Image (cartoon, grey):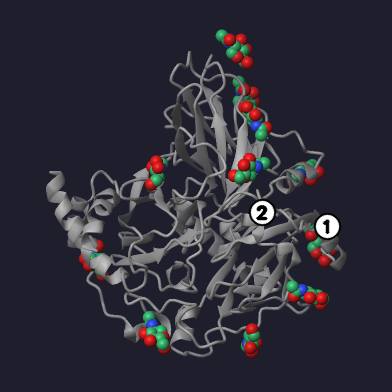
Amino acid sequence: MARRRAAPAAALAFTLAATLVGLCLAGDPYAYFNWNVAYMKTAPLGVEQQVISINGKFPGPVVNVTTNWNVAINVLNSLDEPLLITWDGVQHRKNSWQDGVRGTNCPIPAGWNWTYQFQVKDQIGSFFYFPSILFQRAAGGYGGFTVNNRPIISVPFDTPDGDISLFVGDWFSKNHKDLRKELDQGKALGIPDGVLINGKGPYRYNKTLVPVGIDYETINVHPGKTYRFRVHNVGIFTCLNFRIQSHNLLLTETEGSYTVQQNYTNLDIFVGQSYSFLITMDQNASTDYYIVASARFVNGSKWDRVIGVGILHYSNSKGKASGPLPDPPNDVFDKTYSMNQARSIRWNVTASGARPNPQGSFRYGSINVTQMYVIKNKSPMLINGKLRATLNGISYLPPETPLRLADQYDKKGIYKLNFPTKAFPGPPKIATSVINGTYRGFMEIVFQNNESRVQSYHLDGYAFFVVGMDYGEWAENSRGTYNKWDGVARSTIQVYPGAWTAVLVSLDNVGTWNLRSENLDSWYLGQETYIKVVNPESTNKTELPVPDNALYCGVLEDMQKQQKPHAEALESLSTTITGGRPVVTLLLAALPLLF
Ligand SMILES: *[C@@H]1O[C@H](CO)[C@@H](O)[C@H](O)[C@H]1NC(C)=O
Ligand SMILES: *[C@@H]1O[C@H](CO)[C@@H](O)[C@H](O)[C@H]1NC(C)=O
Ligand SMILES: *[C@@H]1O[C@H](CO)[C@@H](O)[C@H](O)[C@H]1NC(C)=O
Ligand SMILES: *[C@@H]1O[C@H](CO)[C@@H](O)[C@H](O)[C@H]1NC(C)=O
Ligand SMILES: *[C@@H]1O[C@H](CO)[C@@H](O)[C@H](O)[C@H]1NC(C)=O
Ligand SMILES: *[C@@H]1O[C@H](CO)[C@@H](O)[C@H](O)[C@H]1NC(C)=O
Ligand SMILES: *[C@@H]1O[C@H](CO)[C@@H](O)[C@H](O)[C@H]1NC(C)=O
Ligand SMILES: *[C@@H]1O[C@H](CO)[C@@H](O)[C@H](O)[C@H]1NC(C)=O
Ligand SMILES: *[C@@H]1O[C@H](CO)[C@@H](O)[C@H](O)[C@H]1NC(C)=O
Ligand SMILES: *[C@@H]1O[C@H](CO)[C@@H](O)[C@H](O)[C@H]1NC(C)=O
Ligand SMILES: *[C@@H]1O[C@H](CO)[C@@H](O)[C@H](O)[C@H]1NC(C)=O
């Protein structure tokens, strides 16, 4: 059985390896994944609905690779609408062609497949992928993306006894198309129906709030062992407070940077953020323990059900978890609690990152800023009769033709490089307005949140240094409070309501990179832009060429060869996949023979 499956996988590997070898250094391992992205019926909160699965799994598989590996992921779109997968936090050095957002890639039409191919360079850490268009993340389609240190580079803690990924996120029992329709009709989404942990509803900790028959997540552990938990907020817009009853969370990493190791009893995880904790099973297992992810900064009893509850089960556990959940922070009258917690997350400047030199040898605090943007978000408003949300008065309109492709084929008039450096006084508008980034420049971005809801922002292609945050309006003298030494480098950061957050970023990665609100509804309504980074020198060394398999759309549609939708291909795909497991192990064994 296994042999028969190995043959097509190895053949596929060979063709892929052959096409990849042009781009990547031979010698670095290849990992090949075959994904079928399809709808699946399930009822995580007791109401049957359609979710997006990958190879029959919801959440999808964890892509577990190591720095310098070449990754090829063949994505077969079995949905009834276009699809793009983005790899949040994976930097795609020199290669925005693989970023999987509307500004860099044409969507994969329904029934088609497309292979992402990229090398994981110069980074380590915990990230996640998700479908980036059409509000599909609200239906799932997400999973982990782990980049391990190469064996020669030390990790600043002992090898844990296990590695566990948790995907937490607010959830609606409505399908993503219905949610999209509500936003299109100018309605707000209201209060989520719950929080899922790894695609599952809450344990029945309260008989009134949780109906019978809900499947919940159980994490099985052994007493005395220490596990690395990678926790990702894959939700729509709700910040979640994460905690495990009676256990300390030793924070070690966030989105690719090792942090100063500190214990927390709970941590606020904002939409789009990823954290690694080391958790030691040091309790007496008199019962199981609750794993909790509860809605933050919300008011009113209708939010009581917006709590994810899973179970931490010791192998020597003496009984089920019962009684009240561990308390959330009691900070209703202390709005600085969460911000102080965020400020306490610092970079371990002596730990190695992707390369065997100390991370902190990059002294960001002494580099002069060359470009500065203050980006202010406002609550959704009507523009030309449509509900839209803005950044600096502009609600982004995604063009049919991806920006990066338009540049490649010299198509003018698709977008303007005129994103304002600060909020402009005129009436808000809908436009395709992009930031002109200076290659090798050093950019300061201040996010100013003018809404009453917490926001998080994400930049593709880069990690930025988080140097400051505070309440009120940012002013020149706010720079005096910046952390110029050990601000953590990451790709997603929160901005509290009526507050600002400042980041610094070194624009050394050529490409067109999405800067967006991770709150899915804000993003959908226009809170995004792109930073275009071009090397003025004419060279092919700082950016990879357009991939041979690029899809074409918009004004470039004529360049696209038609693909036969894959009903029968789907059939054959299912025979090469063993229970949803990627064929990667097989392949790695076979590859050295190929070179
Ligand atoms: C991920 O890969 C690394 C090294 O290849 C391996 O040690 C680790 O066990 C894997 N993790 C999981 C969760 O499979
Ligand atoms: C920082 O990393 C170094 C090097 O791996 C390690 O020895 C040290 O314990 C870490 N420090 C903290 C505070 O986490
Ligand atoms: C269950 O939740 C309801 C509604 O929030 C609350 O009134 C009740 O006290 C809870 N029951 C228990 C046993 O905690
Ligand atoms: C974190 O808490 C654990 C107990 O859960 C303790 O053993 C460890 O020393 C603490 N580490 C730090 C850095 O405070
Ligand atoms: C286990 O720990 C709990 C909480 O710390 C304590 O109440 C209980 O008495 C302990 N049980 C045993 C058998 O030691
Ligand atoms: C919660 O409600 C109270 C009273 O209505 C209000 O003062 C407070 O600002 C609200 N808090 C949040 C986070 O909305
Ligand atoms: C930064 O700017 C200051 C003042 O303009 C200048 O003196 C200094 O040399 C610059 N530093 C670097 C590293 O360019
Ligand atoms: C963008 O910035 C570069 C310098 O980095 C400059 O040469 C170019 O003229 C700018 N383009 C526009 C349209 O402003
Ligand atoms: C939004 O901006 C206006 C004008 O600058 C200011 O008066 C108001 O306080 C701001 N609100 C928040 C929540 O930041
Ligand atoms: C890059 O440019 C050099 C010199 O112009 C050329 O010889 C080489 O083939 C180019 N490489 C690629 C991959 O296009
Ligand atoms: C997907 O695309 C590749 C390359 O274009 C092709 O070889 C393969 O047969 C396609 N179909 C499936 C189902 O993966």
**Residue 129 screen position, x and y as percent:** 46, 55
Q: Residues within 10 Å of mark 1 (few under 14, many from 20)?
A: few
Is 353 on the left or on the right of 143, as rendered? right
User: How much space separates mark 2 and mark 1, taking CA atoms?
Assistant: 15 Å
* Of the pair 430 and 564, the residue shown nearer to us: 564
Indicate whether 267 appears above or below 489.
above
Ligand 4 shown in quarter: top right
Q: Residues within 10 Å of mark 2 (few under 14, many from 20)?
A: many
Indicate whether 251 appears above or below 543.
above
For the point 85% across and 61% down, the residue is 480
**Marks 2 and 1 close (CB-CB < 8 Å):** no
Viewport quadrant of the N terminus: top left
Question: Sequence-wise, which precedes: disc 2 or disc 1?
Answer: 1
* Of the pair 391 and 194, the residue shown nearer to us: 391
Secondary structure of residue under mark 1: helix
Indicate whether 142 appears above or below 537.
above
**Residue 13 screen position, x and y as percent:** 24, 61
Q: Which mark is residue 393?
A: none
Indicate whether 327 appears above or below 293.
above
Residue 240 visible to an observer of this rendering: no
**Residue 173 screen position, x and y as percent:** 48, 45
Q: Which mark is residue 481?
A: 1
**Residue 28 screen position, x and y as percent:** 36, 61
Location of residue 185 by image quarter: bottom right
Q: Name the residue that disc number 2 marks.
A: 488
* Of the pair 564 and 92, the residue shown nearer to us: 92
Residue 136 visible to an observer of this rendering: yes
Question: What amino acid type should be assigned to the residue bearing mark 1?
Answer: Thr
Of all residues shown, which one is farthest toward the right? 477
